[in-house]
Image (cartoon, rainbow, N blue to C red):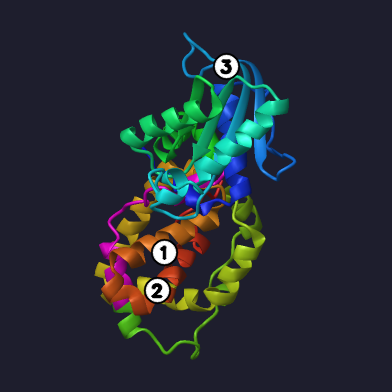
Amino acid sequence: MNNYPCEHLSADEFENLVIRICKEILGVGCKTFSPGRDGAKDSWFTGVAENYPSKVSPWKGTFNIQAKHTQLQDASCSDNDFYVNVSSVLSKEIKRLKEVMVTTRFDNYIIFTNRKLSGGAHTNIIKKLQTGTGLTNVEIIGKEEINTYLNDFPHIAQQFGLFKFAAPLRFFEKDLKDVIIFFGRNRKVLNSGIKSYASVFPIIDKVQKNKLNNLGEEYFDFIKTNSLQYFGEIEDFLREPKNEIYTNMYTNTVSDLQELIILERKRFNEFEHIIKHLVEYVVDSNRQELQSLRSLVRVFIHFMYFNCDIGRVQ
């Protein structure tokens, strides 16, 4: 199961994510979050839930939905500032809900948060919410259950670009590491008489390739500005007979990546995120050896794309 770190989202993006999940489990009538008189945001749904808490015994009536986002990776619902203290997020929320209930009736209350939620904390928070609001149907949904929903409804994770934050695209990166280290030690001096890739090799229609792969114009300009000048030298290096062992390493890596990208392409909206992900994975997996060569790692991945070794061409 993929783990989606929602701390990378903004508060507004997280609210929109919660709405999309609620449209799946409650119904399409789930409203966009709107600010109340006190500035807090609520989403509402009225009717019979399509699939919450189950199809057999769905909740019904008016639902009040809240989203509480944090950018802290290890935040927990058991934290004092969220649950325990008198001035905690939940204590303030209960006070606000009591004020809302004076003029607005609702039957069900659900709060979503991207904090970790243990079984013990869940039980205690439910009791606190029930006591504070007088409602029976209350629920808190933490990051673990949000991840379950995103795995059940992968189109939502895709819509919000969360696949790019999930587990790394793993492949045997050691061959590419060895190629880059050997190339880096034996290459010509940067910017010294390097032939332009375009002047030696015909360029296929990159505009069409970029459209096929959803690679942005700005990022393609970045490739041309920062990496294109080195592609001729890489091509010469790979064509040199004495470097055959490294050419084979490069070829094997390309084959691995071609398959990996086909299988995992849906995780990423834009192809530049695939490139960034691959660069980070290679560097992170070989930090001691490649830390000073990380820009060269990026150049090699850019070369693979530009040379049509990776990415769709038709």
| Residue at the disc numbered 2 | 294
Q: Is residue 30 visible?
A: no
Identify residue type, mark 3: Ala
Identify residue type, mark 1: Val
- Secondary structure at numbered mark 2: helix
Q: Is residue 301 above or below residue 101?
A: below
Towards the viewer: 139 or 54 = 139
Q: Is residue 57 above or below residue 216?
A: above
Identify residue type, mark 2: Arg
Mark 3 vs mark 1, foreground winner is: 3
| Residue at the disc numbered 3 | 49
- Secondary structure at numbered mark 1: helix
* Numbered badge on residue 146: none
10 Å crowding of disc 2: few (<14), some (14-19), many (20+):
some
Residue at 37 percent across and 77 percent down: it is 293
Residue at 60 percent across and 31 percent down: it is 65
The segment highlighted magenta reads 160-181
- The answer for how far apart the CA atoms under marks 3 and 2 are is 50 Å
From the image, which quarter does the N terminus lie in?
A: top left
| Percent coordinates x, y for residue 13 in the rendering | 61, 46
| Residue at the disc numbered 1 | 279
Upstream in sequence: badge 3 or badge 1: 3
